Every structure is written in structure tokens, then in C-alpha cells.
Amino acid sequence: MHVGRHTFATMALTNGVSLYTVSKLLGHSSIAMTQIYAEVIDEVKQKAADLIPML
């Protein structure tokens, strides 16, 4: 169950769904709980940016 929720949240955030909306869809009482998923997305974005050679 947890893996499915995690996958849903990270995919939704990756595809541009707002943090607030994902928070409400997951039933979180605090948006801070949902920000954990956003941090995962930030890490993925940083790793992708690191692959680009310095210009």
C-alpha cells in the first residue's frame, strides 16, 4: 500500500500536480508530510542536471 501511495505522489508531482493538491489527495493533515515526496523529485532533478557538462 505504501509503495503505491509513494509512486502516485512522486509521479503526480513529476507531472506538475501541485504539492497542495497531492497533499489533499493523499489525505495528509499537513503539507509538510507531502513535502517529503517533493524532496525525492528535487534529488532526481539535481542528478539530471549534474549529467550536463559544464559549458
Image (cartoon, rainbow, N blue to C red):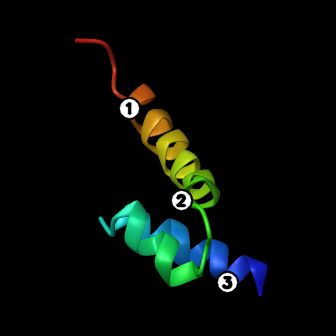
Q: Nearer the viewer, mark 2 or mark 3?
A: 2
**Which residue is identified by label 2?**
31
Residue positioned 62% across, 52% down in the render: 36
Disc 2 from disc 3: Cα separation: 19 Å
Residue 12: which disc? none
**Which residue is identified by label 1?**
49
Q: Position of residue 4 (x, y in %)?
A: 67, 83
Q: Nearer the viewer, residue 46 or 13?
A: 13
Say left or right for 4 vs 50: right
Are there few (<14), some (14-19), or many (20+) residues within 10 Å of tag 3? few
Q: Nearer the viewer, mark 3 or mark 1?
A: 3
Q: Which callout, 3 or 1, points at the residue further toward the start of the chain? A: 3
Are there few (<14), some (14-19), or many (20+) residues within 10 Å of tag 1? few
Tell me: residue 51, above or below residue 55.
Answer: below
Q: Which callout, 1 or 2, points at the residue further toward the start of the chain? A: 2
**Which residue is identified by label 3?**
4
Q: Which amino acid, by three-letter code, is at mark 2? A: Ile
Residue positioned 22% across, 12% down in the render: 55
